[in-house]
Image: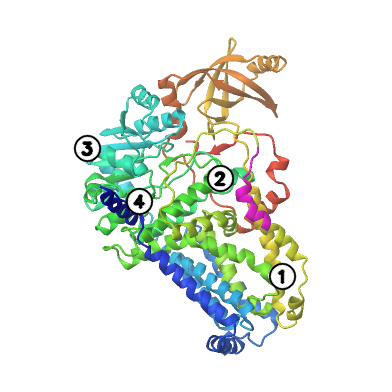
């Protein structure tokens, strides 16, 4: 008996010992080898020291074609001016890239990138001693890493796709009822508030497509969700456990449904009425397994809200859905994004359902489908909208979950770099996505470099001002001019830098943790539907940025003896001061991002103009909405007949509300309500109206008007580089948490049709 128990204990012990992860061992091995080489150089080991001495001699004697031409210094600007002018002219002649214009810009950027890397590799490394050499080589390696990831994007962008015209043709069969496969619509939910879930169900039921069934997949078995499903007339499914989180929930629903196609919407995502009309037609091709559409949001993302730049700067996801996904589509490596997609049931069943070995079930399901020879389509049209994370902490937690899930690729069978069945081009496209998450580590080192320059006297780049003008500026300015143009004006370079910096520390920590322990931490739903009345912040997120900011400020006034002695040798070292000032600006703005602005309303408002008919007392007057939501509206009263009543109202106590009846003329929707506030701004009075409790029928009409109109979600164009820089400086000089402390509702701009 005792020996049997001992045997079982030993067996359980060895079972608990996990097999070492090869990628982790490989990464640690590479780091160990590099550390040994660095130690050998510092400790003056003959073989290693002689090797770096030879490299230093080569850097001191670069090829002739990497030396500055013997011309007046002002002429060194000629390549920059000429190539920047060519790039600027092309982007103005072709505001939207064409195949030819894109190819020309890409060719120029690739040529300048190669020229810049050759100059950096053979002429600028400072290997005069181990300290300078280690910093110089590390910076060079990180630059190559970042540029290499960008080169993959540039290579793939030549075949970027736009399938809207194809959707125009294919939808005719759907509209004419020649191709109408049955569709099951899955809405997986965990703990989202009922008011969010309600409008998603209503939006799915409003889809202009007949053979469909809507299923709410409740992973918390809440009685109130079941009651909501019964009230709205949709199907309700639950399960006895939460095994494999969202993927397990979806796989469980597969057993109880039979639609030929399956559409998945997260609990906060509401489709426009034409979602299925635009996507189902692609499945006429038997090999098509999945059609993915973009994610967009009907609330300001926390970055724009915290900076006070709502409806001015684009959310972070815009770059992915307007730039990255089309080029991945061209490479046959579309990323399934977990919501707002349609998938063929037979294809999904052929691979055993949604992949459950990672928290990014969507991403690896798409990879597995592609590896089996199926085609994934990306339709770059905003056919649904959801809620962005409502705090900066939730925003970062969401990104860190994405990073963890994506990087688990190195440790599972669905690794796109090794799974059988993918082409080299498809693997390259997925490699770019994997490399993206490691750039956070590079960002941190680049932020630290000016500190090493000022405090340690390190000169990582051995170059003069003339060298920078001749070799660096053409590459930098042309890339800057073409950045937003190539990414469909979804993000400027300066704003991209800000987004990268403020999340670099938590993201770098997550990347390191994943590589050491890839499956620590499970799937967590991003909280939605919160309300906050005050500014708040996270010391955990802010502390590394504050330390770095203080160190940067001190460094700008620090005078190092080694630095002073090197100024005569390398006139370009003064560029380190500019580098430090730039870091000071981006770190300061990043800290402002971390201060969460208030959320005065749990409901979202829209800049939607609709004609209203108001019955105030015994008078009927007209008005036009400025803003409108599910719970109220702000209406400009345009008829003088009501002004005397409104004047009388404003003279009363604020606690007395004026009841009224109203009709939204465009949709013939009658509502009751009360005036809660009146303001006189200019010629006409504006009234704030709060709606009375809505019936299901009234709520359906309102949701369809606010969320479901085809084409209503706009593609916001990012500000240009100069305007982006000005906006950042303006935010820095007039931070929202000091100069705009009063909570206010921000309405999202939408198309007015």
SS majority, magenta: helix
Q: Earlier in the sequence, mark 4 or mark 2?
A: 4
Distance in Å between CA atoms under marks 4 and 3: 31 Å
- 228 or 171, which is in the foreground? 228
Residue under numbered circle 4: 165
SS at circle 2: helix
Residue 492, visible in the rendered structure: no
Q: Nearer the observer, disc 4 or disc 3?
A: 3
Distance in Å between CA atoms under marks 3 and 1: 66 Å
Contact, CB < 8 Å: mark 4 with mark 3? no
Q: Earlier in the sequence, mark 3 or mark 2?
A: 3
| Residue 454: assigned label | 1
SS at circle 1: helix
Residue 416, visible in the rendered structure: yes
Which colour scheme appears in the figure?
rainbow
- 391 or 713, which is in the foreground? 391
Contact, CB < 8 Å: mark 4 with mark 1? no
Q: Earlier in the sequence, mark 2 or mark 1?
A: 2
Distance in Å between CA atoms under marks 4 and 1: 56 Å
Looking at the image, which residue is at 67% across and 16% down? Answer: 655
Magenta segment, which residues? 535-547
| Residue 393: assigned label | 2
Distance in Å between CA atoms under marks 2 and 1: 33 Å
| Number of callouts | 4
Look at the image and say whether residue 537 sits in the magenta stretch: yes
Residue under numbered circle 3: 258
SS at circle 3: loop
Residue situated furthest front in the rendering: 2
Q: Earlier in the sequence, mark 4 or mark 3?
A: 4
Looking at the image, which residue is at 47% across and 61% down? Answer: 436
């Amino acid at each position: 008996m005792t020996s049997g128990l001992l045997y079982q204990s030993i067996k359980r012990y060895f079972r608990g010992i996990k097999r070492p992860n090869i990628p982790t061992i490989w990464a640690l091995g590479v780091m160990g080898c590099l550390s040994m080489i660095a130690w050998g150089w510092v400790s003056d080991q003959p073989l290693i020291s002689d090797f770096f001495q030879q490299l230093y001699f080569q850097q001191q004697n670069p090829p002739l074609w990497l030396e500055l031409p013997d011309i007046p210094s002002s002429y060194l600007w000629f390549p920059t001016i000429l190539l920047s002018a060519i790039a600027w002219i092309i982007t103005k002649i072709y505001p939207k890239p064409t195949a030819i214009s894109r190819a020309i810009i890409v060719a120029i950027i690739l040529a300048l990138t190669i020229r810049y890397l050759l100059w950096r590799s053979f002429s600028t490394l400072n290997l005069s001693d181990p300290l300078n050499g280690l910093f110089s080589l590390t910076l060079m390696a990180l630059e190559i890493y970042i540029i290499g990831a960008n080169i993959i994007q540039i290579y793939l962008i030549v075949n970027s796709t736009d399938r809207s015209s194809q959707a125009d043709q294919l939808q005719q069969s759907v509209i004419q009822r020649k191709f109408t496969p049955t569709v099951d619509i899955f809405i997986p939910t965990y703990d989202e508030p009922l008011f969010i879930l309600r409008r998603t169900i209503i939006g799915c039921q409003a889809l202009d497509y007949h053979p469909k069934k809507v299923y709410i997949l409740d992973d918390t078995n809440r009685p109130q969700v079941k009651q909501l499903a019964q009230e709205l007339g949709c199907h309700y499914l639950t399960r006895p456990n939460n095994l494999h989180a969202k993927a397990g929930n979806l796989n469980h629903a597969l057993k109880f449904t039979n639609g030929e196609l399956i559409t998945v919407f997260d609990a906060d995502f509401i489709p426009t009425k034409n979602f299925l009309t635009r996507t189902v037609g692609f499945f006429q091709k038997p090999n098509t397994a999945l059609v993915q559409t973009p994610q967009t949001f009907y609330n300001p993302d926390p970055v724009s809200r915290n900076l006070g730049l709502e409806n001015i700067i684009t959310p972070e996801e815009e770059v992915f859905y307007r730039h990255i996904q089309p080029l991945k589509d061209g490479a046959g490596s579309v990323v399934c994004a977990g919501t707002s997609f349609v998938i063929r049931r037979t294809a999904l069943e052929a691979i055993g359902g949604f992949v459950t070995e990672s928290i990014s079930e969507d991403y690896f399901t798409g990879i597995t489908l592609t590896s089996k020879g199926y085609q994934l389509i990306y339709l770059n049209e905003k056919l649904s909208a959801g809620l962005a994370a409502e705090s900066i902490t939730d925003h970062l937690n969401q990104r860190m979950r994405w990073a963890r899930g994506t990087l688990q690729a190195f440790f599972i069978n669905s690794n796109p770099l090794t799974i059988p069945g993918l082409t080299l081009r498809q693997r390259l496209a997925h490699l770019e996505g994997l490399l993206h998450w490691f750039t956070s580590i590079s960002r941190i080192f680049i932020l630290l470099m000016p500190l090493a320059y000022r405090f340690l006297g390190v000169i990582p780049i051995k170059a003069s001002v003339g060298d920078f003008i001749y070799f660096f500026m053409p590459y930098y300015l042309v890339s800057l001019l073409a950045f937003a143009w190539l990414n469909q004006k979804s993000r400027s370079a300066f704003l991209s830098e800000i987004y990268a910096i403020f999340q670099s520390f938590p993201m770098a920590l997550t990347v390191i943790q994943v590589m050491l322990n890839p499956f620590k931490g499970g799937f967590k739903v991003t909280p939605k539907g919160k309300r906050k009345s005050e500014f708040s912040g996270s010391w955990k997120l802010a502390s590394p940025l504050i330390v770095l900011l203080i160190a940067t400020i001190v460094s700008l006034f620090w005078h190092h003896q080694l630095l002073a002695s090197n100024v005569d040798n390398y006139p370009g070292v003064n560029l380190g001061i500019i580098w430090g000032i730039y870091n000071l600006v981006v770190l300061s703005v990043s800290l402002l991002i971390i201060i969460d602005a208030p959320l005065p309303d749990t409901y979202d408002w829209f800049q939607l103009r609709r004609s209203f008919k108001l019955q105030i007392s015994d008078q009927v007057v007209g008005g036009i909405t400025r803003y409108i939501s599910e719970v109220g509206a702000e209406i400009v009263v345009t008829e003088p007949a009501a002004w005397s009543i409104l004047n009388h109202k404003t003279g009363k106590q604020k606690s007395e509300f004026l009841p009224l009846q109203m009709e939204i003329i465009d949709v013939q929707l009658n509502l009751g309500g009360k005036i809660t506030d009146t303001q006189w701004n200019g010629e006409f009075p504006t009234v704030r109206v709060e709606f009375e409790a809505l019936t299901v029928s009234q709520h359906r009409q309102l949701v369809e008007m606010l969320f479901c109109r085809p084409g209503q979600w706009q593609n916001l164009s990012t500000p240009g580089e100069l305007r982006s820089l000005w906006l950042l400086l303006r935010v820095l000089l007039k931070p929202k948490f000091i100069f705009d402390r009063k909570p206010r509702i921000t309405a999202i701009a939408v198309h007015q049709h």
